Structure formats: C-alpha cells, structure tokens
Amino acid sequence: MTTGSAVRPNPFAVPSGTTLRFGLLVIAMSGAAMSGGVPYISRLFIELDRVDPQAFRSCAFGFIADMDAGRPTPPSGEWRELCGGPSALESVVPNLASLFFFWAVVLILYWFRPALRMRRRRLIAFPADRRPEQARELAELRTAADVEEPVEFVVNLLDPTMTGLAFGRPGGRRVMLSRGLLQLYDEDRTAYRAIVLHELAHLRNRDVDIAFLTDSAWRVFLWGILIPGVIGLPFVPLLTPTVAGPLPFYLLAAWQLLLLGVLVPLARNSVLRSRELHADARAALAPDGAAGLTSVLSRAATPADGTGTGNETKETEELTGTHPTPAARLQALADPARLFGFGPRIALALGVAATLSYEPVTGLVADLSGTSRYGPLALLPIALILGAGLALGIWRAELAACLTGRPWDHAHAVGAHLGVGLVLGTFGSESYAASLGSAIEIPLSTMLVSALLLMAGGYLAALWMAGTARAWAPVVVSGEHRRTVMLGTVGALVLLLDLWLSYLLQLSTWSEALAASDLFRPFPGVARLFIGAVVQPGLLVPPLVMIGLLVSVALLPMLGGTMAGRTTSRPPHRLVLGAAPGDWLPPPPEPGPGVAVRTAVWVSGVAAVVCWSAHLLSALFAPGILLPTHFLHGLALAGLTQVVVALVVERRTRTTARELRILHSILAAAITGAVTHLVLMVSRDHFGCVHWGFDATEYCNLVPDATTWRIVLQTQTWGLLAATVTVLLRVALARHAHSGGQHDVRR
C-alpha cells in the first residue's frame, strides 16, 4: 500500500467536519433554548398558581408506585392532568414556543447583518472603472475558484490591514477587500491572489451561511439565555414560587448553565476554525493557490525577529480562537488528512450536547406521541444525534486512514470522552434538577451505576463504529455502494444506541427490585446493582432477540471484511485530490467470520462427543441416577464452553484490531452456544426415549417442550453475555498491559 505522502484525501468527498461541528452547535443551542426559555414562556400558557406542588407530588408518586408494581396506570400525560398538573398540550407549547422564538430571532439577526455590515463599515462597491485590470483578475479568480453564483466585490477603505471577508445572503453574496489588500495587489500579486481565492473558497464551500448563523446564534444565546440565566437564577423563587426547590436543585441548574456556557462558545469556535481550514483546502485546488497560501501563512507564522519555523501550534489558541493559527493552517495544507480528524474533544462535546438536550427533546416527542419518555420512540432523536455525529466523525477518520495507510488510533480515547460527556450532560440535565426540586430522592448507588453504564455504552459504541467503519472502508473507497454502506452502518448504530438508552434510563424504576433480589444478594450494594443491571437484559429481553442482536452486531463488520476482499483495487478517484498513484492498493481486508466459525464448530464437536459419552456412561453404569442431573450440569458446562471458545478466538485473532477481536469472539460464542445446547436436548431426549435397562419415559420428548426451550435459550443468552463481558475485560486488560510496550498499529 502506498504511503500517506503519496495519497491526499479529498476533504470535500464526504460531509465536512464543519457540517459535523455546526450540527453539534445547533443541538446545543436548541436544547439551551428549550431549557432556558421554558420558565419564562410557560407563565404565558400555564397558570402556575393553580398547581399545588405538594398535592401534585403525592398524586404523582402514587402513580409511579403503581407503575413500578406492575399495576395498570394511565399514560403520563393523563395522570399529570388527573393530579392537577399541566396537560400534555400545556407541556408541549412552551418548549415549541421557546425553540421557535430563539431561532426566529437568530434568523432575523442573520438576515439583516449584511446590510448592517455594509453601513457600519462604510463599504463601497469595488471601483472597476478605475482599476479595470484588477477587476478582470477578480473575475478570473472567481472562475478559478469555481464560484457559479454572482459575487459583488466591495471595498473597505478604512481598513489598512491585508484582510478579506466573504458575507451576504443567498443571491447577494459579497467579498470585502480591505485597503491594505488592494495595495497588496501592486506589491505581491501571488499573496493577493491567495487571499482572494481563500475568500471565494468560502462561497464555493457554501459555509458563509453557516458562519453567520453560528455567530448570530451565539449572540442570541449569550444575551438571551446565558446572561439572564446567570443573573436570574437566584431570583427564581421570587418569580415562580410554586416551583422553588432545595439547594441541590439550584446547584444543578447552575451546573447546566456552566456546561452550556463552556460548550456553546467552544463549539462556535470549532465551527469557525474548521471552515477556515476547509477554505484553505479549496483555494489550494486553484492554479498557484497552494503556493500563494503557503507563502502568506509562512510569513504570518514566523515571528518578527525571524525565530521559529512556523510549525509551532499553541494549544490555547487552537481551543479558544475563532481562527486557526498559521501553523495549523500550514499543516493542513501540507496534509489534507488532518481535516478528517475526529478527536476526543469533539466526542466529549457531542456527549454533553446530546444529554443536555435529552429532557426537552424526549419530553416534546413523548407528549406529542403519547408514549413514555423512556421508550425507544421518544429517545430516537437523541440516539439519532449521537449516532449520526459519532458515525460521521469516525467514518471520515477511517476513510482517511484507509487512503493514506496511517491507522486512526483515537477510537479508545473518543469512546472514553464520549462516555464522560454523556455523564456530565446527564447529571446537568433538567431531569435531575427537576427530581431534586420535587424532593424525589435518587439513590447514590443508582446515580453511580447509571454513570458507569453511560460511560460503558459510549465507549463500546465508539469501538464498534470504529471497527465497522475500518472493515467497510475499502468497500467505500472502491466506490461500491458507498452511500448504502455508510447510511446502513449509521442506521445500525442509531438503533443500538436507541435500545441501549431506552434500557438504561429505566434503571431507576427497577433499581430497588434489583437491590433486593435474592439472585444478586451475595454481592455488596453498588456491585449488586451494577451486576444486576448488566445481567438484567438477559432476563427482560426475549432470548432470541438478544442472541440475534448480538450476532448481528458481530456479523456486520465481518461482512465488511469479506466484501473488502472481493472489491477491485482501482484508484479511488472521487476520494483523492489529484490523481491517485497507479500502484495504490487498499489495506489488507479485515478477516471474515471464518476463524470464529471454524473454532466454534470444532469446539462444539468436541463438546458434543463429551456430552454423548457422558450420557452413554450414565446409561450403562448409573442408570436413573446421573441422567436426571446431566441436563442441568450440561447447561452450566455449555455456558462455560461459550466463555472458553470466546477467549480462544480472541487469542487466535490477535493480529486483528482489538474491537474486531471482540466481535469475532461474540460470534464464536453464539455458534458454540447454539450447537452445544441443541446437543444437550437431543442427547437427553434420545437416552430418555431409548430404554437402557430402566424407565426414563419422563425425559422422553421427541420435540422439546416449551419449558425446555425457554431454559435452554435463557442459559444460552446468559452464556453469551458472560462470554462478551469476559472478552471485553480481557481486551481491556491486555491493552492496559500493552500500553507501556511497543505500539500496536492494529490497535
């Protein structure tokens, strides 16, 4: 495979990082609008004085207790009204009104900003009659930048710096040229062309609207939500005395404001920095564009005293600045693969934004649909936010890794930071603040287990998506079914996250039952709840559904590895800048399910021989004594066999990426469990129906009864879950032990 320097990935072949960051900003802003505006707008729709908080809480707790006990209860919207609270319509209208009002103000500000900019900066039309040669060159640059829409060039004669700015609404695009930039035309024509091409590239990339919507939304958020929230939080009891709560309620509300106050400006800065880097990449495609930009940025990156190389990047500036440093821009010009990066900071922000938006979004969907806030339908928007953002970022990173041959090794860090972001956002969401404000006691053990499971879910989702994208990347690069593959994997991740969140958010409703369960009583308090939460899917979810889900999760990446081995190794014209080298080859395909299937069949065959031999010995030497107990003992041994074969497959696939080794082990454990449990039933029924010198008709079932099937499927599910957890721990410990040694390029 060619080296990274020989292949330059095309950052415009897939949705850009700017789009991902702007979507993240919109999510955070929308959640902030619905959370921050409701306390004020709700007073226009709800007569808060008619709601008796104490009576409402007592009535609501009664319905919740009936729900936990399994007794029939009306939908949440109905019992809220029965308890004297707001109706479903009264709950929906404030959220929608807050969201509409926020974005209406943003759009109004965005619409009038070009005219305000023209007036405040006293911009005038470019004097084409006095500078005809420069006007012709501007037209040539517009053509070179591949900008098809009309562009009006304007001049700022009051600005002596060498700057430009692309702005304007659709149909009225403008590029501002400063007085210093006009002078540069006579002094350094190459630098002048590079700067103008950069501004025209913003128009070609269609990111002008993104930039001005981002800035307008930031201003509305700052002056309409953040500052009023900080100032007005101590006065909430005076404005709405009926919803006043204890001190923890205000502390969590302040925590939510703090998270939004940090997340929103950093997301805004990230959007603006990303668009600048993509504009550089677009301008570099024009003739002499790369050379001109490199010259301009090199001078800007070199200190006035001549020291430095221009390659130094300041971390603080990269985090807080609205423009990337010259050093960062030079690095992105030299290596466009940097524009495909998806790092831990974005994953952290994604987790925080999604969970901060959880309460208003799920409440809105639940009230409109009449379903539970913990149901898959209500949680689908949050799963879509998480899944689409995570999948897009990882797909971009893995495609660049496939093209350049440089492995993307941030999957574990991205997963860990996504999990931390989910925890930070969850404990700053309205649900916890409202619970404390309503004197609802959330056990510390429940909060701790929820945090651990949230982190585990985010981490595993990132690992699975990374492994899946890595396995399918050669197929996408070859151009075969590109959109189908990418959309299919995104849909699978969204479905998994939806089911996971729906299960996890119901933890508080059955945490007390788990804590009191005799099954988990030998374990200490928090460990009992955590182990119960991990085992609970095997009890609540139908076994066939659980087995099918885990097998599907394991098979999807392996199918990608199989398809990658059959794709043609033609140069990926659509995904590279310029012509791909003729000797370019995709990376070796990830192994298919062959190793897992062969190992599972071999171990299952040995287990079958052992099982039949045990029954034969029982019939010959201890008839009527060992036979009744062999089945139960066999179930335990079958589960243990699933764990053993999972570890064996993990060992045999050590040359594969860690996250894919886990999936190979899951598939092998599922096949082993199916075969060994089937052998158990068949052998027992055979020796029960064939008389070996004793009467065993009670064990004779030519067709296993429903009870036997239920027991077998349940134990097979538990064995598969045990094998999955064991392999996860094995891989995690192996990675920790390996971190101090040689770097593993297969991760």
Image (cartoon, rainbow, N blue to C red):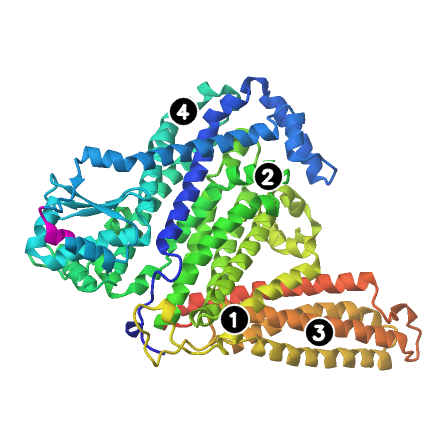
The quarter of the rendered structure image containing the C terminus is: bottom left
- Magenta stretch secondary structure, dominant: helix
Q: From the viewer's perspective, tell me whether residue 335 is left or right of residue 426.
A: left
Can you say whether 715 is above or below 583 in the image?
above
Picture residue at 57% right of the left edge, 32% below the top:
440
The residue identified by callout 1 is: 560
* Quadrant of the image occupied by residue 685: bottom right
Q: From the viewer's perspective, tell me whether residue 526 is left or right of residue 413.
A: right
Distance Cα–Cα, label 4 vs label 2:
31 Å
Q: How far across and how far down the image is residue 115, in percent?
A: 26, 35
Category of crowding for the residue at label 3, using alpha-carbon neighbours closer than 10 angstroms: few (below 14), some (14–19), many (at least 20): some
Amino acid type at mark 2? Ala
Q: Nearer the viewer, mark 1 or mark 4?
A: 1
Q: Earlier in the sequence, mark 4 or mark 2?
A: 4
Q: From the viewer's perspective, tell me whether residue 513 is left or right of residue 357.
A: right
Distance Cα–Cα, label 4 vs label 3:
64 Å
Task: Determine whether the residue tagged by mark 2 lies in a helix, strand or loop.
Answer: helix
